[in-house]
Image (cartoon, grey):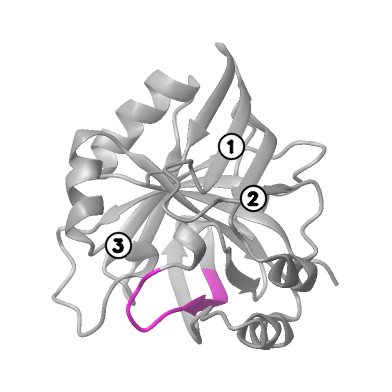
C-alpha cells in the first residue's frame, strides 16, 4: 500500500509568530492543535486537502516554552541552532510527513536502502475534541534524511486530524521532493508527488510546495 502525503511541517519560533505568518502568506488562520509532551512542542493546524492530496494539512510547530527539559532531541531537527536562528527570522517549511498503514514494513524498506528513517515511537496529544494517537518514525538525533526530503512516516491509530478541521480556503496544488534516492521512492510510492535529483552541495530546496490560496498561488521552498 502506498504512503500518502499527510502533512507539511512549518517550524516557527513561536506559535504566535506562526499564526501571523500563515495569515500574511496563505491568507488563512490555523486552528488550535495541542501539546506534544513527548517532544516538548506544540502546534496549530491548517487544512490544505485537495483532490490530489486528500486529508492533508499544514502543521505550524514550535518549541513549547512551558514544557519541561527533555532527555532527547526534538523531532524535525528543531534543536538545531541554525534552524532556530532561521525560524526567529520567519517560519520555515522543513519537512513532509507521509501516512501509511504498514509503517514497520516501509521503515525497514528504507533501512534496506541504506537510509536512517529512525525508530518507531508512540505519541499522542489531547485536543478539544478528543485524544489523537499515532506511531511515528523519529531518528535518535532528531535529524531528517535527504535534507528533509525523505518523509517521516506516520501511522494514525483512530481519528485523523483532518476529520476535525474545517475548510480553510487553502489547497495543496503540487509538492516536489528533491534528492530522495530512487530506491526509496520505489518503497514509498507516493502518488501525486513530483520528484527530482538534488546534486551534492546544491542550494536548491529539498521540498517545494505550491498552494491555491484566497490571494492566489503561493509556492514555498524549504529551508536549506
Q: Secondary structure at mark 1?
A: strand
* Left or right relative to 61: residue 181: right
* Left or right relative to 33: residue 12: left
N-terminal-most mark, 2 or 3: 3
Range shown magenta: 132-143
Instruction: Measure the C-alpha gap from mark 2 to mark 1.
Output: 19 Å
Query: Marks 1 and 2: in contact by CB < 8 Å?
Result: no
Q: Is residue 170 visible?
A: no
Q: Is residue 223 magenta?
A: no
Say which of 216 and 182 sits in front.
182
Quarter the N terminus occupies: bottom right
Which residue is found at the position 59% from the left and 50% from the top? 178
N-terminal-most mark, 2 or 1: 2
Q: Position of residue 210 (x, y in %)?
A: 61, 30
Pointer 1 residue: 209
Q: Residues within 10 Å of mark 3 (few under 14, many from 20)?
A: some
Q: Position of residue 189 (x, y in %)?
A: 80, 64
Q: Is residue 209 visible?
A: yes
Amino acid at each position: 500500500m502506498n504512503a500518502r502525503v499527510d502533512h507539511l511541517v512549518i517550524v516557527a519560533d513561536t506559535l504566535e509568530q506562526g499564526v501571523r505568518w500563515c495569515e500574511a502568506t496563505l491568507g488563512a488562520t490555523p486552528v488550535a492543535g495541542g501539546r506534544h509532551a513527548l517532544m516538548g512542542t506544540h502546534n496549530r493546524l491548517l487544512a490544505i486537502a485537495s483532490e490530489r492530496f486528500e486529508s492533508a494539512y499544514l502543521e505550524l510547530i514550535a518549541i513549547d516554552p512551558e514544557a519541561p527539559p527533555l532527555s532527547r532531541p526534538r523531532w524535525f531537527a528543531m534543536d538545531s541552532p541554525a534552524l532556530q536562528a532561521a525560524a526567529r527570522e520567519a517560519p520555515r517549511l522543513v519537512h513532509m510527513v507521509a501516512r501509511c498503514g504498514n509503517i514497520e514494513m516501509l521503515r525497514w524498506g528504507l533501512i534496506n536502502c541504506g537510509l536512517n528513517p529512525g525508530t518507531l515511537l508512540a505519541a499522542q496529544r489531547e485536543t478539544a475534541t478528543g485524544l489523537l494517537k499515532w506511531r511515528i518514525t523519529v531518528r535518535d538525533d532528531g535529524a531528517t534524511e535527504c535534507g528533509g526530503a525523505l518523509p517521516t512516516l506516520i501511522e494514525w491509530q483512530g481519528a485523523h486530524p483532518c476529520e476535525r478541521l474545517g475548510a480553510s480556503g487553502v489547497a495543496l496544488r503540487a509538492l516536489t521532493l528533491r534528492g530522495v534516492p530512487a530506491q526509496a521512492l520505489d518503497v514509498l510510492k507516493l502518488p501525486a508527488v513530483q520528484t527530482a535529483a538534488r546534486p551534492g552541495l546544491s542550494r536548491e530546496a529539498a521540498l517545494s510546495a505550491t498552494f491555491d490560496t484566497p490571494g492566489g498561488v503561493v509556492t514555498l521552498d524549504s529551508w536549506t
